[in-house]
Amino acid sequence: MQAKRIIDAHSHLFQVRVPTEDMVRSTEEVKGFDADEFVKLTDEAGIVLSQAMPQCLERRMLEWMGSNDLCADLGKLLPGKIYACGSGEPLDWKGSFNRDHYEDIKQHLVNGTLKGIALAPPYGHWYSNDRRAYPWYELAVDQDATIWFHHSHMWSTPKPPAVVSHYHKCPLKYARLTLLQDVLIDFPELRCVVEHMGYPYTEELLCLLVHHDNLYADISLMIAPYGTRPSRKLMLARYLGMSREYGVLDRIMYGTDSPGFAKFGEEYSAATYVEQVVEEVEFLENDLPEVMEKAGFPALSDDELEGLLWRNAARFLRYES
Ligand SMILES: [Zn+2]
């Protein structure tokens, strides 16, 4: 029997969230980073590949989670284990084309130090179909790079005052999937992912998936409870059941969103990461069948589960074992 394989198609591994002026640019600055330990522990757990990306939150929040240089360093130190991506804001604070960010990501893609781009329109308060962002999509297509879209709500704590600031940080009007449909129509070759199943617009996302073969989605942030936020296992079960009925389950990928939203207050390490993956995969293998039936859907077959855990991501990321 083949050993278990897992691909994490959405992570912020070792991407420390700090104000822009304190951006972390190399793994040497990351407390708890140990490349050998990472390889050993992920190999033991069957995690063959982890996507990793910083998140640029500069335009509205004056922050970065990690940086493009840090993620490129991670990819260099862990070849074959990390699918390294970058991030940026297509518009600067004035609303003009952000040439500095564009040139930085372009250089990384052209040099092969990064393979994809993370974009978050609702955090940056811009519409994904804004023509000022189109050069980024053209660049991705030209470089055969992938794009991760945070095109959903922010899973914020229900407690004030954070809820107030989060609403201001992530207005839903920028997250509507119909905006992304314009982009997909204009760039059918664009290889991209909608994170977190695009909630709360998941059924709109499934309609987009039907028509765009290069579009994928990930289930990150739906299994484990994070901080004060409850898990959404019933919602996940419904989304997976609906994905099957729309005929797009083979483009849904497992992802952790680690560590951006994992285990507040704890020191982060490869062990923390692997522990999260092991717990979540155990849920998917052992408990999801019952939750899916509770949600009114047949359980995933072994083949469908294998697709969710690694095969769909392997196709998208062009992973060759
Ligand atoms: Zn994320």
Image (tube, rainbow, N blue to C red):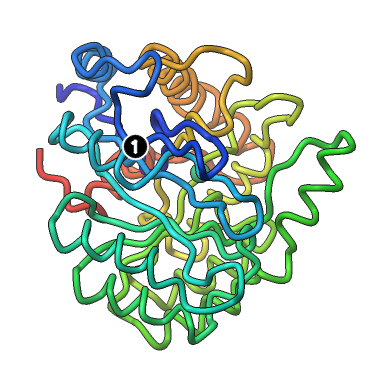
Specify the amino acid type for callout 1: Arg
Q: In the picture shown, does residue 256 fall above or below 132?
A: above
- The reply to whether residue 13 is in sight is yes
- The reply to whether residue 254 is in sight is no
As drawn, which residue projects farthest toward the right?
A: 160
- Please report the residue visible at 59 percent of the width from the left and 76 percent of the height from the top: 95
- In this rendering, the count of numbered labels is 1
Q: In the picture shown, does residue 227 fall above or below 217?
A: above
Q: Please provide percent x and percent y for residue 18.
A: 55, 35
Say if disc 1 is inside 8 Å of ligand 1: no
Residues 245 and 21: in front is 21
Mark 1 falls on what kind of element?
Answer: loop
In the drawing, does residue 222 fall left or right of residue 231? left
Q: In the picture shown, does residue 307 fall above or below 228?
A: below
Q: Please provide percent x and percent y for residue 145.
A: 25, 63
As drawn, which residue projects farthest toward the front?
A: 21
Q: Please provide percent x and percent y for residue 84.
A: 27, 44
- Please report the residue visible at 62 percent of the width from the left and 37 percent of the height from the top: 293
Provide the residue designation for mark 1. Answer: 25
Q: Quadrant of residue 121?
A: bottom right
- Please report the residue visible at 22 percent of the width from the left and 56 percent of the height from the top: 108
- Please report the residue visible at 63 percent of the width from the left and 20 percent of the height from the top: 264
Residues 24 and 237: in front is 24
Q: Please provide percent x and percent y for residue 240.
A: 53, 49
Q: Quadrant of residue 28?
A: top left
Q: Would you call the spot at circle 1 few (<14 residues within 10 Å), some (14-19), or many (20 or more)?
A: some
Q: Quadrant of the N terminus?
A: top left
In the drawing, does residue 317 fall left or right of residue 301? left
In the drawing, does residue 72 fall left or right of residue 199? left
Q: Quadrant of the C terminus?
A: top left
